[in-house]
Amino acid sequence: MGIKAIIFDIDGTLYYSADYLRHLTRAVIEALAELMEVDLREAEIKFRSVKDQVKTISMGLKLLGIDRHVFYEVVVEKVEPCKYIRPRPELKKLLANLKAKKIKVGCHTNSSRKLAEKVLKCLGLSLKDFDLVITCDDVEPKPSEEGYLTVMKTLGLKPDEILYVGDRWEVEVEPAKKLGMKTALVSRKHHGDPDIYLKDVMEILDKLDELDC
């Protein structure tokens, strides 16, 4: 049947910026301090603790008793991603080329919709460039199955007709593979068991043949 849809993670997948990651982490810790009414040092300790337990801060918010939507409203006001993320006009061409092949394109992120929109704008993209957008405003964060199941239900596709592309094996790519999706890991190191590895997401057109599309 071939691949009929490709779902992309955003952060670390469509781009990589160590500087933005540090900036975002700082904003997250500041938001936690503000919402929990503690100092930055205690907020950072709590941040590191929940990350160790559940791998993602979006999932860790439950452990801290913080409303996810309120949290991201605070974070989005603190971050300035365009200071750290450069435009990638080639991404828009990539999405257009995939659509020309009759392949649906979507994004699935643990960020809120406002934060995702802010980051995509820095890359030269918008939510309208995707056929499907799923954020933590819509479903439980990864590695929860909810987002992946929503992708299948919304697009009306079987799992093996979908290619999931992400940069974190355990948190986002492995859950997709367990559900039967084809998977691609954006990483310079081989780990986990994805169907294909990508050093950069732009390699995906050349790699599709490996999936017998």
Image (cartoon, grey):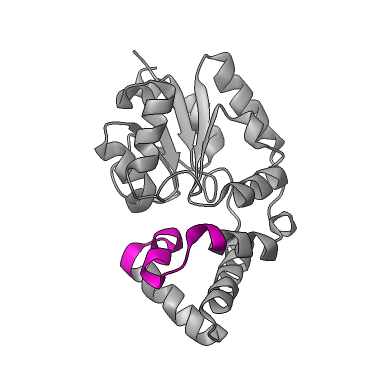
Does the magenta portion include 37? no
Residue 3 seen in render: yes
Does the magenta portion include 66? yes
Q: Position of residue 167 (x, y in %)?
A: 45, 48
Residue 190 seen in render: no
Q: Position of residue 11 (x, y in %)?
A: 54, 50
Q: Which residues are magenta?
A: 53-70
Q: Position of residue 205 (x, y in %)?
A: 51, 25
Judged by its main secondary structure, the magenta piece is: helix
Q: Residue at x 53, y 38 (%)?
A: 201
Number of marks drawn: 0
Position of 3 relative to 24 (above/below): above
Nearer to me, 182 or 46: 46
Q: Which image quadrant for residue 40? A: bottom right
Q: Residue at x 34, y 13 (%)?
A: 1
Q: Say whether residue 107 is left or right of residue 157.
A: right
Q: Position of residue 82 (x, y in %)?
A: 73, 54
Q: Residue at x 44, y 43 (%)?
A: 166
Q: Which image quadrant for residue 125? A: top right
Q: Say whether residue 188 is left or right of residue 69.
A: left
Q: Residue at x 36, y 52 (%)?
A: 171
